[in-house]
Image (cartoon, rainbow, N blue to C red):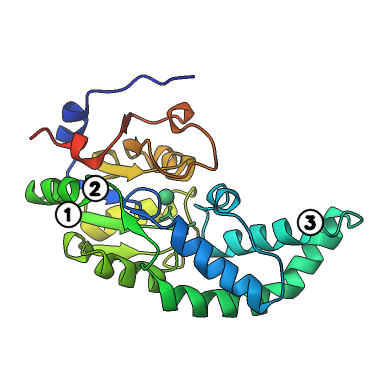
Amino acid sequence: MERVQQDLAALLARTDAAIVDLDGTMVDTLGDFAEALNRMLRDLQLPAIAPGAIERMVGKGSEHLLRSVLKHVLAPDQQALTAMQLEAKAEALYPQAWERYQHHYLAINGQYAALYAGVAEGLAALHRTGRPLVCLTNKPTDFARPLLRAKGLDGFFTHVFGGDAFARKKPDPLPLLKACEAVGTSPARTLMIGDSSNDAQAARAAGCPVVLVTYGYNHGQPVRGVDADGYVDALTELIAS
Ligand SMILES: O=C(O)COP(=O)(O)O
Ligand SMILES: [Mg+2]
């Protein structure tokens, strides 16, 4: 179902700040995920995973991604395993997988990732309006900060909060409420900009208006099917030049 698009200029006029998601919204990090995950899988002598499969698993933080990847690569050879046995096998590998993944991700962070078209220009235009901008991602903060720096985006943000910054991650509203608190704005006047249903659900629950980009990762589902106030093909569409 296609949702009704609100007038973007009117939507923006009702906001004092913006919260911006990272993976799938500002940076196409699928190449980084694939490289770090496949290096980790090699270390654990497990089969490789294709980027297409990874794309559907991104958005709920690294812990969820890692568990999904382990189960995915263990499943084909373990047909006889019950769901519980598969879970237990993935859990047994998890500590080593996490150590290896973190090591490799930090080593390659940003090298296989690229800004989406219009991101630098769109953020610059938003920044020029004087609104505080917060980067809010489910990625660990230690992965997010160097990535923003490497891609020349760090200067736009007053705050950067990763998936480990608060007790719960998106789609829980808590990180958005904390981000609003950090910049001193009310949720109703703070725009969430994201790429997935996690961002939209968190925004709805927090009471923030939400705009989704159409080019990111939405667990393999069409993003226009997600309940949001607007959809853009590039961040530059947010501000009429
Ligand atoms: O690491 C992830 O799961 C993706 O994070 P983000 O889309 O919230 O930036
Ligand atoms: Mg995202």
Q: Which mark is residue 142?
A: none
* Mark 3 crowd level (few <14, some 14–19, many ≥20, 10 Å Cα): some
Of tags 1 and 3, the one toward the viewer is: 3
Query: In the picture, residue 45 is in which quadrant?
Result: bottom right
Residue 103 position, x and y percent, is 51, 80
Taking the image in four quarters, ligand 1 sits in the one at bottom left
Q: Which mark is residue 75?
A: 3
- Whether residue 167 is visible to the viewer of this picture, yes or no, is no
First-in-chain label (3 vs 2): 2
- Provide the residue designation for mark 1: 132
* CB under 8 Å between discs 2 and 1: yes
Quadrant in which the C terminus appears: top left
First-in-chain label (2 vs 1): 2
Q: CA distance from mark 3 to mark 2?
A: 41 Å
- Whether residue 44 is visible to the viewer of this picture, yes or no, is yes
* CB under 8 Å between discs 3 and 2: no
Query: In the picture, residue 97 is in which quadrant?
Result: bottom right
First-in-chain label (1 vs 3): 3
Q: Which mark is residue 18?
A: 2
Q: Is residue 140 above or below residue 68?
A: below
Q: CA distance from mark 1 to mark 3?
A: 45 Å
